[in-house]
Structures are given as C-alpha cells and as structure tokens.
Amino acid sequence: MRVPLLSDKELISGYVGGKEGNLELLINRHRAKIFTHIVLIVKDRALAEDIFQDTFIKVINTLRQGKYREEGKFLPWVIRIAHNLAVDHFRKVNRMPTTSGGEDFDIFDIIKDTDDSIEEVVVQDEINTDLRQLVEMLPEKQKEVLIMRHYCDMSFKEISEETNVSINTALGRMRYALINLRALIEEKEVTLTNY
C-alpha cells in the first residue's frame, strides 16, 4: 500500500510543529524548479547554489517566525524570494565604481575596454533575449535540463541526480528540448546570428 504524499501545506504545518524532516521533503520536491529559475537569471551555477541556500534560509526564518500565510502558493512564494535575491545580487554588483579622483586618477582605468562595437553588443543582447524567450516556451522538464546543461555546465550525471531521473531520461529530455527549440526558431523566424 502506497503512503499518500503530503501536500505542501501539510509539510509546512508539520515543520512548524517541530518535524524538521518536512523541510527537507519540501526542498527536494521543489529544488529543480527553484534552482532552474535562479540559474536562468544569474547564469552561474555556483552563484545559483548560493542564492538557492539564501532563499531557503529566508524561507526557514519566515516559517519559524510564523509569518508565512498558507494560500496554496508555497512554490510561487519561494520562487519570488529567489527572484528578489538574484535581483538584489545584481544591484549590489552593478553599482558604479567610486574613485577619489586624486592626482593619479585616470578615467580610462575604470572604463571597460571592449573589442565589440556597440552595434555588436546590442545585436548579441537581442539574440540572447530572443533565445531566452524561446527557452521559456519549452515544456518545463525539457527547459530544466537545457538550462542545467548549457547555463550551468552540468554533466548529464549531475542533471540526473539533481532532477531524480535516469541519465537516459535526462539525455532524452535534452534531445527533445533541442528539437523543440529548433522548431520554435523556425516557427518564430528568429535569427540567432549577427551576420
């Protein structure tokens, strides 16, 4: 006889009531979706893992303080926290450099030297935006594998462990993701080169 799966609401109320293991079940249940969402924003696996941990520290604190209001929206709530933490990270990183402007000050020391023309940068940015929009149209499980593979440089073994599926299933999802992506590129007539 199979034991029925507890809902998020039941797991949360159990965790708040002292069942520590319920949190692990919640994290494992939603890990892949939350992690994929973070990676899509930050495009860096190590940074995504840090933000993922920070997200659950915030979740734990909110639950322990009794501030979480269950409305059947646990996953969207956690994704919103993760999203905000990722955005906050970029706000901190992208602040303008400050300088004393002393005698040795040279404006060219803080201006990034780029080989690309502004036009090339704009075109590449448009291509990346178009591609991101197409990836968002893929079925959830295919999108997940594609993002982990290409944005996180994860091996198929790591992907299979992260998503709790066999390596063959992960490979199959990747194959279908690429097939569907090609079809979307043709259907939407998107140009992915800057020539």
Image: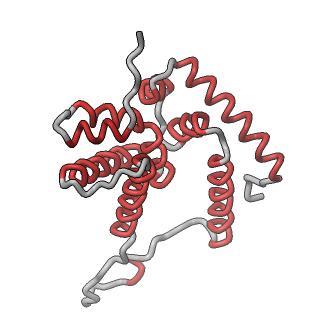
Q: Residue 28 in the image: x percent, y percent?
A: 36, 32
Judge from the rendering whether residue 137 lies leftward or rightward of residue 114; answer left or right.
Answer: right
Q: Quadrant of residue 99?
A: bottom left
Residue shown at 33%/68% (left/top)? 92
How many marks on residues? 0
Q: Residue 69 in the image: x percent, y percent?
A: 33, 55
Q: Quadrant of residue 82?
A: bottom left
In the picture, the quarter occupied by the C terminus is bottom right
Q: Which color scheme did the rendering employ for the protein?
A: secondary structure
Q: Residue 80 in the image: x percent, y percent?
A: 42, 57
Nearer the observer, 57 or 129: 57
Residue shown at 68%/56% (left/top)? 130
Nearer the observer, 71 or 122: 71
Judge from the rendering whether residue 136 lies leftward or rightward of residue 24; answer left or right.
Answer: right
Q: Is residue 115 above or below residue 164?
A: below
Q: Residue 58 in the image: x percent, y percent?
A: 26, 53
Residue shown at 28%/50% (left/top)? 59
Q: Is residue 12 above or below residue 104?
A: above
